[in-house]
Image (tube, rainbow, N blue to C red):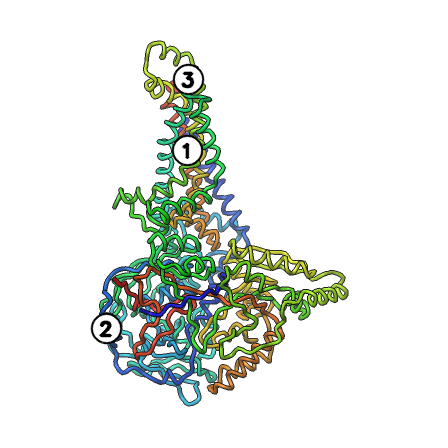
Amino acid sequence: MPAEDRTDRRDFIGRGLKGAAGLAAAGVVGGGLLEACATSSTSSTTSTAAHPSSPYGGTVTMGTWSEVNSLSPPVARWDATGYLYANAIYDSLVQIGADGKAYPYLAKSVTPNGDFTAFTITLRPGIMFHDGEKCDAKAVAGSLNAVASGYITHQSLQPIKTITATGPLTVVVKMDQPWPVFPAYLAGQLGYIASPKMLARKDQGTVNPVGTGPFIFQGWSIGQNLKVTRNPHYWQKGLPYLDAMTFLPLEDNQGREDALRSGTVNLIHSQYPGTIKHFTGDPNFKLIETKIPPNGESAIDFIMLNVTKPPLNDPNVRRALALGLNAAELRRVNGFGLVEPATSIFLPGSPYYTPTSYPQFDPAAARKLVNAYKQRHGSAPTVELSTINGASYQLTVELIQQQWTAVGINCSVAHVDFTAFLTNVVLGNYEAATFEQFGVSDPDQNYVWWSSTTVGGPGQVSLNIARNSDSRIEQQLLIGRHSTVHGERLAAYQKVSQYLADDLPFLYLYKTLWAAISKPNVAGITHQTLPGGQQSVGFFEGGLLVHQLRLNG
Amino acid sequence: MIWLRRAIQLVITLFLVTFLTFMLTSLLPGNPAYVICGSSSTQCVNEVTTRLGLNHSTIVQYWDWLKNLLTGNLGYSYTVGSTGTSNGVPISTILSSSWQVTVEEILYSQVMALVVSIPLAMWAALRANKLFDRVSTTVSFGTLSLPPFIIAPLLVLLFTVKWSVFPGVGTQIPSLVSDPAQNLWDLTLPCMVLALTSIAVFQRLLRADMITTLEEDYIVMARAKGLTTSRILFRHALRPSTFTLMTVAGVQIGGLITGAVIVEYVFHINGLGSVLTNAVSSHDYPVIQIVTVIVAVAYIVINLAIDSLYSVIDPRIRRARASH
């Protein structure tokens, strides 16, 4: 039975940016350098270690925190729910191991050239899509090209120049710059391989996906359920264990909790500290918290500042907001006693963590800055703090509003529905906004969010949502992207952390917490075995591989 | 002639409702093209804008939409299954099973409400100002003051989590055709939430009308003739006392749709309420417009039907209409 992690830590939900999470997850399960990717498995149809004592059969019904807009890799904006669906229906070329390294999965090997400007993906022979099409180099190249040129997905894959099938089972991906971490992106949305017939359809399989995965798509009632059944010809022999899975999007935290307690579902995931608290210590359920791989980062709840909008274009105003923000009080009020603090883009425990000059709560110092602003401009700074609808978010922003008002800042609050919120922040139509982001298995996968190259003009799309253009950060991000020397990367990202503390586009609140909660007989949630024998990263930021889920007893 | 007049009224009302709905939704902030494209590509936004006709004036867009509606084309979702290059899922697909669920919820809840409220009201009227009447009045007012979003989670906690009497949130409810018994059982708790408010309203209205009716001369005559109480209540007093009840039942349809939104959210039921909630939160304007039309049509047709029932219940109305 996999080990369980139960902590008394807690975190505040931030729904964050689902679409952006989907983009970030062009690397959300990424990480690790190429040394791991040059290895390969020896067999094409792999026998993964079975669990002879566990029964085959049964159905797991999982309650998810959201619904997705599409089941097609080139079209979708996947978040944790999207990756659950994807892991059921598709396979990714690469998966991330418990050690944070990227291991071949659907691919047999991923081998870089000398300067990491090209990668050769060798496929396993004999793998078929659910519709009978061959999963060969042409199909894989077509799928990769579709995602790399997708409306939403292409922006995080800009270094890719060409993707070509060079043999029946060989695909070569060429970059316009060295990109050692690229294999980790093959564990994200890019690497989920879809059938060519599916991609040829006008909707590219948005509501009718076809992959190579452990389960075959049966039906999707959007907003209600997604049903999949066992793939009897799955290339990982002996898997999956389950006959079927059903996913129920239950966005309401209490509803999801009630569904698990009443037995409607036997597995859920949750970010909400209240839910995690309720199940912590409950002998009738199993609780597993997210595992951050060694090179990876946890998501963080924070306030995003639009540094191009007055008065937030004044660094002293941003500093005043940071000094006036009592994150400890927020953790105490909202966090149910489970929250861990965050004072940097990297958290303690991360190899990239380093203490920075990020301002600590100091209301007196905040007031001084506010008064100085008043003297220069004649009135106090005024900031609008946006969030999405929901009682817990309302509590957060009202608390922050109180804190900022106490130091002399005029703060108004705006509640916006999620879709409008997403549109607003990406177009820069916001001043300050609650956010949850940056959970990745390698810091390079946050490049698009921090890079100066993705800052858009006024009214234009900007994936660097804070619109913080800092050449120092860009320089270090490129070092982190191009270098294979661990020490060099460490130093680069530590500098990024410090420069972000200087620029203050983000005001950190706390570490985001994810947990999977299930009935005791549900096993295989974590510590899955990859085709090469390594252990997978398991349950990470709300997602997990589902092919080894089983019902014990 | 009356029917012709009613039909013309129906058409005019529907035209006004659809026009207003379309105009109001067009005023909502946000651009559907950005919703579809994920705000990520100017090219995508331009293409989608052209494909969906968003660059035309609102009047032109409304006219195109109306023409499609009248030919049975409900349009396509902006958000469900929509990509930069292809239309989303047809709205008819989204609504295909959801409208049936909501109709069933409303009918089941109203039957529940009537079955409970009518006997309660009759007994309270018979025992006016006595203990039972006072207790039922108090309970009614208490129930009326509890909104569905309070009642629903409470009932879920009690009857699915604590006592496991009914299936839990998210249970996949079979259709009425495939498994009627399971369908009705699974819908009992959600419909109970909808019915509670109706029970209180119906009971209060019918009680008041029954008290008035029971003071009529013909009821005194019936008693004098030695008819039993039950015969007097059911055969002579109930029918003329139901006019207000029927009128309110028809007017309540709008409120039940609203209640269904909450119930379907809490119980995770794929009905019109869920569809509408999702559409509003994702700026799926075509779905909002179609659901609004459906609700408007349902409202008008039901009230038309109730209007017709008056003449069935009261022959005097039938004769008065016939003489016109």
Q: Chain of mark 1?
A: B
Q: Chain of mark 3?
A: B
Judge from the rendering whether residue B172 lies leftward or rightward of residue A374; answer left or right: left
Q: Mark 1 sits on what residue?
A: B199
Q: Mark 3 sits on what residue?
A: B214
Which residue occupies 59% across, 74% down?
Answer: A500
Assign the C terminus of chain B to one quadrant of the image. top left
Mark 1–mark 2 Cα distance, whole angstroms, equals: 58 Å
Q: Amino acid at mark 3?
A: Leu
Relative to A296, does residue A288 appear above or below in the rendering? above
Rate crowding at label 3 as few (under 14), some (14 to 19) or many (20 or more) other CA atoms within 10 Å: some
Name the residue nearer the viewer: A245 or B116: B116
Mark 1–mark 3 Cα distance, whole angstroms, equals: 21 Å
Rate crowding at label 1 as few (under 14), some (14 to 19) or many (20 or more) other CA atoms within 10 Å: many
**Image position, residue B92 (x, y; %):** 37, 50
**Image position, residue A488 (x, y; %):** 51, 86
Name the residue nearer the viewer: A173 or A516: A516
| Image quadrant where residue A430 sits | bottom right
Q: Mark 2 sits on what residue?
A: A237
Name the residue nearer the viewer: B181 or B58: B181
Q: Chain of mark 2?
A: A
